[in-house]
Image (cartoon, rainbow, N blue to C red):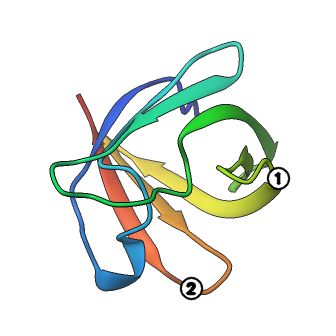
Amino acid sequence: MSLAGKWKKTSTPKCAEGYPDAIEFFERPRYLATKGPGQGFIWWDAGSYEVTGENQVKISIATDEQVSYRFSISGELLTFVDKDGCEFQYRRV
């Protein structure tokens, strides 16, 4: 499962407001995220990531902390679950 590519958020539960509207994961492994209209602070802005297991990724967040997330890819949908159990999805664009 490769995260590489451009993704657009498709689900917006209240708990996911701090995650970007769009994100691009590069092969190197770096990422660049963008806010949606009217969106405030986002946890993921730009940085590095590392797939650490079959369904685990460590992402450097806005505070430079390395945070682990569960993820899965099914077709064109990428689902993340954070440490608090917040689940949100992106679609490959």
Location of residue 30 in the rendering, given as x and y in whole percent from the top left corner: 66, 23
Q: Decide: is 89 above or below 15.
A: above
Quadrant placement of the C terminus? top left
Secondary structure under tag 1 reads strand
Q: Residues within 10 Å of mark 1 (few under 14, many from 20)?
A: some
Relative to 81, 49 lies left or right: right
Location of residue 50 in the rendering, given as x and y in whole percent from the top left corner: 78, 37
Relative to 6, 2 lies left or right: right
Q: Amino acid at mark 1?
A: Gln
Q: At 51% from the left edge and 62% from the top edge, which residue is drawn?
A: 80
Q: At 57% from the left edge and 28% from the top edge, which residue is drawn?
A: 31
Q: Amino acid at mark 2?
A: Gly
Residues tagged 2 and 1 counted as in contact (Cβ below 8 A) = no
Secondary structure under tag 2 reads loop
Q: Hey, which quadrant is residue 3 in on the image?
A: top right
Residue at the left extreme of this rendering: 37
Give the residue pinned by disc 2: 85
Relative to 44, 92 lies left or right: left
Give the residue pinned by disc 1: 66
Q: At 63% from the left edge and 14% from the top edge, which residue is drawn?
A: 27
Quadrant placement of the N terminus? top right
Q: At 68% from the left edge and 32% from the top edge, which residue is drawn?
A: 47
Q: Decide: is 86 above or below 72.
A: below
Location of residue 86 in the rendering, given as x and y in whole percent from the top left corner: 49, 81
Q: Decide: is 45 above or below 54.
A: above
- Sequence-wise first label, 2 or 1: 1
Q: Residues within 10 Å of mark 2 (few under 14, many from 20)?
A: few
Q: Nearer the viewer, residue 91 or 13?
A: 13
Location of residue 59 in the rendering, given as x and y in whole percent from the top left corner: 71, 47
Label 2, label 1: how many angstroms apart (C-alpha)? Answer: 17 Å
Q: Nearer the viewer, residue 72 or 22?
A: 22
Q: Kindly report which numbered mark, 2 or 1, lies closer to the viewer in this rendering.
A: 1
